[in-house]
Image (cartoon, helix red, strand yellow):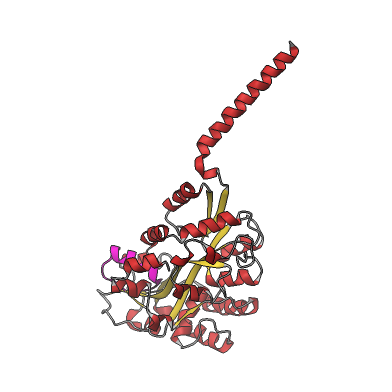
Amino acid sequence: MKGMKRTGKLVLVLAVLMVFVLALTACGGKSSENGEVRVYCFGDYIDPDLIGEFEAQTGIKVIMDTFDTNEEMYPVIANKSVEYDVICCSDYMIEKLISEGLLYDFSAGSVGPLNDMENYGNLDEKYLAIAEVCDPGNKFAVPHTYGTLGIMYNTENVAEGEITSWNDLWNEKYSQQIVMPDSMRDTFAIALKAKGYSINTTNEAEIQEATKYLEEQKSLVYTYANDSARDLAIGNSADVVVVWNGEILYSQEENENLEFVIPEEGTEEFMDLWAVPQYAENVENAKAWINFMLSEEAALKNYEYLTYSIPNKAVIDEVSSDEKIMSYLFPDESVLSKCETLKSLGSENDDMYSKYWKEFKAE
């Protein structure tokens, strides 16, 4: 009798457990059947609908965290504060992470090289070449977005074609109508290009000259801003603002009087890339995420969401018939040949830039 009661309880427990497991399966659905991928990315950098689409297609659950700057992301990855499977960050930071052995080398890993992904061929080779500046051989990272720094101006108050040079940002005619970046390397890049120097110079005399030039400009500047620069132009608070090219299409939808130019001296170009930390637990799932983001459908959807340059052939084909959009988002070789990507300069040179940045900010 006693044995029968014990068996009955065991059956009851097993039945309850079975119901619980079935309930979990029903709630989790396909999104949990193949594990998870932990993604760390700039905020608001992909169409949110793409997460659900990836989960439905692959059965891999996405855990998404975001950050604001590369510098905020770096210690998280370097110190393994949180263990992510795939990250998106900028070119110079990719270079830094590679140099410190913090990224997974797909050319030597067990999951195969990046170029064996089904959708890798969707990337435009021109932009893969640009990516090699920070990742020689394209072994560690895959392009996500691309952009150039330029000047957006209001044609109601500034004649179209009137602004052609970075040096125009020092014209007293635009006093208190100028918005400059509040970002050390980007702000120095403008002054260095205006003076004809490389944005990656480690020549202290050139950095000193750029610092003095920025100090001379200070009284003309309405404010120093990053994300809000676009909105100041849209709202007619400022006529001449420095922005990334991806801001122009959205800005023109809100204010039809805005125009954009890449200065004749050339400019800073950036590329943000997907990569996998060396310690990642779910490398195959990370690679599946990257492959999904390279698909024509995902690239087009993300382009519509971001209006930034996505170096995917499908996106380029989509806008190729519009010469204006092409000039904004995918400039030709005459422009690209004068562009530079920020490079990781090492701690000693970083300290030198920081010293002069603090001097400029304190002036």
In x, y percent, where is residue 325?
A: 32, 71
* Placement of the N terminus among the 4 image quadrants: top right
Residue at left 26%, top 75%?
Answer: 155
Residue at left 52%, top 66%?
Answer: 142
Residue at left 55%, top 77%?
Answer: 343
Q: Tag count in the figure? A: 0
Q: Residue furthest top?
A: 1
Depth check: give the residue in front, 267 or 334.
Answer: 334
Depth check: give the residue in front, 309 or 359.
Answer: 309
Depth check: give the residue in front, 22 or 252.
Answer: 22
Q: Is residue 110 magenta?
A: no
In x, y percent, where is residue 264?
A: 38, 85
In x, y percent, where is residue 65?
A: 53, 54
Residue at left 60%, top 25%?
Answer: 16
Bounds of the magenta segment:
240-259
Residue 43 visible in rendering = no
Residue 360 visible in rendering = yes
- Quadrant in which residue 337 is drawn: bottom left
- Quadrant in which residue 228 is drawn: bottom left
In x, y percent, where is residue 86?
A: 56, 58
Q: Is residue 244 magenta?
A: yes
Above or below 151: residue 305: above
